[in-house]
Image: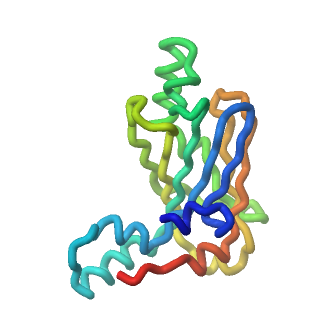
């Protein structure tokens, strides 16, 4: 995890726009497998099963914070704005975050997970799941991930993801 979180390794990117801190982290397959198996032993068959399960997808964690707090703790000015932001984060982020190639081929988000932390975290973090298409990855040197303005006056925020980092993602000795 330390390797992944070190910006210089290319798996984590950060941007600050109008007081809002954004970070995007790619989560390699083996990291998800390790998270599921924990520290317990696992059979080779189960390990292969989990690698196959997670290996079909690409996982990205998008974190956003303002004043080192979750967005819901700082951005809404009243109850209506709070409700609108909860609704947006919980149900509509698939319409606000876009992953596409240079030639504008869009990868559809398969799922996203927004765990409510109720003010106990320093950031709002959402995991996005996209199909892993090896042919598309090998034909493109970068993927673009954009986040539409969420009412925070940031405008569209864009990250460039080096596909080589995904193709050659780090492996764990599991």
Q: Is residue 167 above or below residue 143?
A: below
Q: Is residue 74 left or right of residue 155?
A: left
Q: Residue furthest bottom?
A: 44
Q: Residue at x 66, y 28 (%)?
A: 152
Instruction: Name the residue at 35% across, 81% down.
Output: 174
Q: Position of residue 28 (x, y in %)?
A: 50, 70
- Percent of width and height locating residue 167: 60, 79
Where residue 69 appears, as percent x and y from the top left, is: 53, 32
Could you say which is closer to the camera, residue 144 or residue 172? 172
Depth check: give the residue in front, 118 or 51.
Answer: 118
- Specify whether 92 is left or right of 8: left
In the rendered image, the residue lying farthest to the right is 103
Residue 78, above or below 39: above
Indicate left or right for 162 with 67 as reference.
right
> Could you say which quadrant of the image residue 66 lies in?
top right
Tell me the residue at 55%/24% (across/down). 74
Q: Nearer the viewer, residue 47 or 8?
A: 8
Residue for point 30% across, 81% down: 47
Q: Residue 90's x, y, as percent?
A: 44, 37
Q: Is residue 156 left or right of residue 58?
A: right
Q: Residue most toward the top?
A: 78
């Amino acid at each position: 995890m330390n390797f992944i979180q070190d910006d210089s390794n290319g798996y984590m990117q950060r941007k600050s726009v109008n007081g809002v801190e954004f970070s995007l982290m790619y989560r390699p397959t083996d990291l998800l497998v390790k998270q599921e198996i924990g520290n317990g032993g696992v059979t080779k068959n189960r390990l292969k099963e989990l690698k196959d399960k997670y290996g079909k997808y690409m996982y990205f964690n998008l974190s956003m914070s303002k004043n080192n707090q979750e967005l819901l703790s700082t951005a809404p000015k009243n109850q209506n704005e709070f409700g609108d932001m909860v609704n947006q984060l919980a149900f509509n982020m698939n319409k606000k975050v876009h992953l596409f190639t240079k030639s504008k081929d869009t990868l559809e988000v398969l799922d996203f997970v927004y765990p409510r932390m109720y003010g106990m975290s320093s950031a709002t973090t959402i995991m996005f799941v996209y199909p892993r298409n090896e042919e598309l990855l090998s034909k493109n040197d970068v993927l673009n991930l954009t986040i539409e303005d969420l009412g925070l006056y940031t405008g569209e925020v864009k990250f460039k993801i080096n596909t080589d980092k995904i193709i050659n993602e780090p492996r764990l000795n599991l």
